[in-house]
Amino acid sequence: MAALEVRDLEVRFAGLGQPALAIPELELEAGARVAVTGPSGCGKTTLLNMLTGLECVRHGHVAWAGTDLASLGEGPRDRWRAAHVGLVMQDFHLFPGLSALDNVLLPQRLSRWRLPAGLADEARRLLDRVGLPDPRQKAETLSRGQMQRVAVARALLARPDILVADEPTASLDAEAGAAVADLLLALADETGATLIVATHDPRLAGRLTRTLRLDAGRLI
Amino acid sequence: MLGFIAADLRRHWIGVLAVTLIIALAVALGVVVTLQERALRLGSARAAQAFDLVVGAPGSETQLVLSAVFLQAAPLPLMEGDVLAGLIADPRVAWAAPVGFGDFVDDHPIVGTTQQLVGGLGRLVEGRTFAKLDEAIIGAAVPKEMDARFHPMHGQPQGPAEVHGGISYRVVGRMAATGTPWDRAVLVPIEAVWRVHGHGADAGHDHDHDAAPKPRGMAEARQQHRDFAPDLDAPINPAALSEAHAPGLPAIVVKPKTIADAYKLRRDYRSAHTVAVFPAEVLTRLYGTLGDARQVIALVAYGAQALVGAAILLVVVIHVLQRRRQIGALRAFGAPRAAVFAIVWLEVLTLLGTGMLAGFALGYAAARLVSRVVETASGIALPVIATPTDAGALIGLFAVGALVAIIPALLAYRQSPAAALRG
Ligand SMILES: Nc1ncnc2c1ncn2[C@@H]1O[C@H](COP(=O)(O)OP(=O)(O)O)[C@@H](O)[C@H]1O
Ligand SMILES: [Mg+2]
């Protein structure tokens, strides 16, 4: 399981005087359940982008189990993320025109010539696990709650040891949001993955074991 | 990957269809120009094959060839009547046959000539050759039955015409298709043409226009013309061609015995009274002009293709920019960067390839259609033939397109996934 070590992380955007994110030191143990909270614009998404290697670490270090993302180029970072990180975003980023099953399989399909044997079955199992009745249903015909559950299944297909969700319940109604929150927690438990969730939702944050409160890019 | 591309294209099918169609039309334009120009060159060369040397009165050489070989209706100046006799007697000449115009039946030209030219043009598939003056041989594309009788019309088929009511020909033979304007022609003995127009052996006999009482007005003149009925119920008399007072002719087709003879004849018959031309040579000159025209048209076609290419690129770039969230998201969820590049590149190549294939088919079909129309109108068979060079040109075009398509693919490739997710 991955343990995270952050040192001297600083993110600046052109035109902003203050750094958007400044974290001198942060450590998470493997398998942690972490909420990242704070007002809108405080830097939650920026932090998650750094932790998942979606953006290049220019200042400081972000090391997962000893792998410093700051030292990786763009291609290796993509590969590292594909191998270790499952992502769930506020907007589900499903592809209309493809079935739920094809959406779950898509990143893997694009990563290799042939799907490894059993991966499609695993995807079906995950869709069943997240409670989707018909894996062949087209993505655009799903309800929003179902869409997010498909996104959760997709995030888990490659068996990541880090599960990251950015406001996963923000665009869902309370009931669907609660269902997705349940799923994230349960699946993180089942897989033993480290779970990091940026959220406004105090009920979701309350169910995680640790809360990182951000304000203007700083931990408080 | 391919399944994803297919689903993606299917989802944007209206845009995909529009872009493919535009590519297809641009390609078709170029294909038609290339194929038709080639067809015209091949077709006219084939049409001129039977015509080694054409002798006419001094004037436009091009017009002489267009009239004698392609049967284009145009008034030609006449040669003296003794030129044909001289050619027939010439030891360097295998055969020489007159080509005399004037009348039409429906819109088929009636050409007066002799058996030699009939033999030179091809063979008969039905019936026999003409033996009497009122017998006619029809080209393959003339819709008449054997034994059918018809009255010739004087003048242009489109312009004011007079029916020679008192004259009728009988169809006795049909020629094999030659793919030349002669397929649309009706061949009659030249003597008959002379007699119908008031010349020839028994011209003074009773029906000469000049001998008739002077008409007192247009209507009466027309009536006289309609009623004019020379005697065509007579066998062909080959000696009539060589008579000293034979009527003038617009053109004579000459088959020289050897190539050397052909050059000598051409030299000898380039004089103050006659002009001799190799139709092939005149055609070559025409192709030169045609080639210039083709180049202009080809430039327009290439220009259109370049514009289409630029427009397509723009459309694709805008499309990629609009979809950068989707595409960037693929990388965030674990798709390799190369896959993102490949998706965009292959999508553009699919559009391009489909459009180009459709365009080639469309252009080929259009060229065939143009050929068909020209063929019905002129009788000249315009063979539409695609060659390996065409495939080469298309592959070249595709390669250029593939290179240009790298631009939007790179745009997608360089798209930051984080920015893509932010939207
Ligand atoms: N690409 C960018 N360019 C400039 N400023 C940015 C960029 N991305 C984020 N920011 C700024 O950084 C701050 C943190 O943004 P973000 O991490 O999205 O906040 P949160 O996710 O907590 O709402 C905001 O002030 C935002 O405007
Ligand atoms: Mg955010």
Image: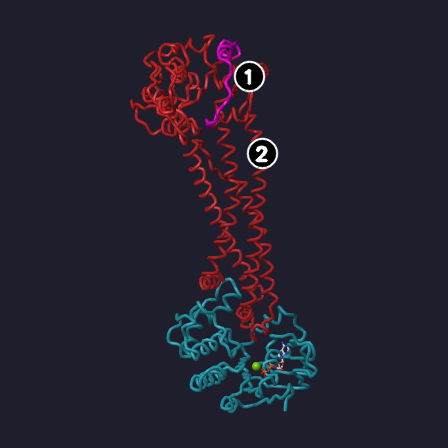
Chain colours: A cyan, B red
Q: What is the chain identity of the residue bearing mark 2?
A: B
Relative image position of residue A193 (x, y in whole percent): 53, 81
- Under mark 2, the amino acid is Thr
Above or below, B292 relative to B11: above
Question: Under 8 Å from ligand 1: the CB of mark 2?
Answer: no
> Element at badge 1?
loop
The residue nearer to you, when weighing A193 against B82, is B82
Above or below, B318 relative to B104: below
Q: What is the chain identity of the residue bearing mark 1?
A: B
Relative image position of residue B247 (x, y in whole percent): 46, 13
Q: Quadrant of residue B145?
A: top left
Disc sitting over residue B210 in the figure: none
Check disc 1: other Cα within 10 Å, few if <14, some if 14-19, many if 20+: some
Quadrant placement of the C terminus of chain B: bottom right
The residue shown at (56%, 31%) is B286
Above or below, A68 relative to B32: below
The secondary structure that dominates the magenta segment is loop
Residues at marks 2 and 1 on the same chain: yes
Relative image position of residue A202 (x, y in whole percent): 51, 91
The residue shown at (36%, 23%) is B222
Marker count (numbered): 2
Q: Nearer the N terminus, badge 2 or badge 1?
A: 1
Question: Under 8 Å from ligand 1: the CB of mark 1?
Answer: no
Residue under label 1: B274
Q: Quadrant of ligand 1?
A: bottom right
Is residue B90 one of those drawn in magenta? yes
The residue shown at (60%, 89%) is A213
- Under mark 1, the amino acid is Thr
Which contiguous range is marked in magenta?
Answer: B69-92
Residue under label 2: B289
* Separation of marks 2 and 1 at Cα, in angstroms: 25 Å
Q: Quadrant of residue B337?
A: bottom right
